Amino acid sequence: MAKKLSKNMVKARALVEPRPYTLIDAVPLLKKAKYAKFDETVDLNIRLGVDPKHADQMVRGTVVLPHGLGKSKIVAVIASGDKIADALAAGAEFAGGDELVEKIQKEGWTAFDALIATPDMMKSVGRLGKVLGPKGLMPNPKTGTVTTDVVSAIKEIKAGKVEFRTDKTALVHVPVGKLSFDPQKLVDNAMTVIISVLKAKPSAAKGKYVKGITLSSTMGPGIQLDSTVMELAGKA
């Protein structure tokens, strides 16, 4: 049985015509459709023509949003020696060694948005897959969260670094800011993500790579974007 839509959602959806919009037109429309009492997150959803079952067609990467996400991420670092003090000095909320690994493993503690680990600690961190994996928090060299340069990694995450990756349905879902952002900042952030996803196209991908892009907010309607966004991204 289909869930009944609230009156507010019905009104919000009625504002969106069943056609593709330019990114520049979609952002103000999303703001106009707002009815929630909190500052919603704006999300970009990109449908890709890849088969995520094949490792060589997995699309994954990171990108630093030019205007951040509107909130500072809580960062934890698992390291050893002087790297722990370096991490705390660079702004990490939590930093430690095996005691932090034990806390995550035994207590299921994940009170952080990003976890960075130094390569020498990955043998211990590897045991945390069951806790961190489902939450997308497992450190990975490809996303820059397994590194000896913890200071730079922390600064990038704090500046608005986000990760993107295809899910089982070949969809890439990435937050691009808050609905209260200036419209141009949301446009800039969204374009930065689209360009990065285009550049991450696997050589094994065949046929049409991007099948569709939708912009939405936490409670708002989804707005389909037209092909101009792809043309602009391709020229960047």
Image: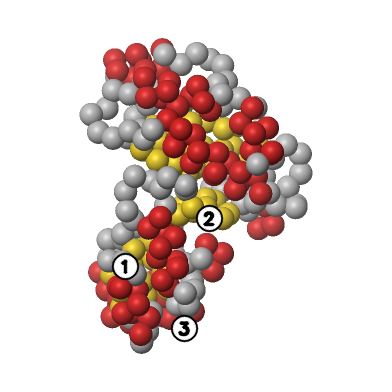
Q: Secondary structure at mark 2?
A: strand
In the rendered structure, find residue 62 and report the number of the disc placed on it: 2
Q: CA distance from mark 3 to mark 2?
A: 23 Å
| Percent position of residue 144, x then y | 51, 66
Question: Residue 135 in the image: x percent, y percent?
Answer: 39, 56
Residue under label 3, please give it.
Answer: 120
Which label sits on residue 92? Answer: 1
Crowd class of label 1 (few under 14; some 14 to 19; many from 20; radius 10 Å): many
Work out how far the residue at label 2 is from the one at label 1, CA to CA, in angstroms.
19 Å
Q: Position of residue 230 (x, y in %)?
A: 65, 33
Residue shown at the point (76%, 44%) measured from the top left: 206
Q: Earlier in the sequence, mark 1 or mark 3?
A: 1
Horizontally, is 8 left or right of 191 in the view?
left
Q: Nearer the viewer, mark 1 or mark 3?
A: 1
Instruction: Determine the image quadrant of residue 216.
Output: top left
* 38 sits left or right of 163 in the view: left
* Quarter of the picture holding the N terminus: top left
User: Is residue 25 in view from this perspective?
Assistant: yes
Q: Is residue 131 above or below residue 124?
A: above
Dot 1 falls on a residue whose secondary structure is loop
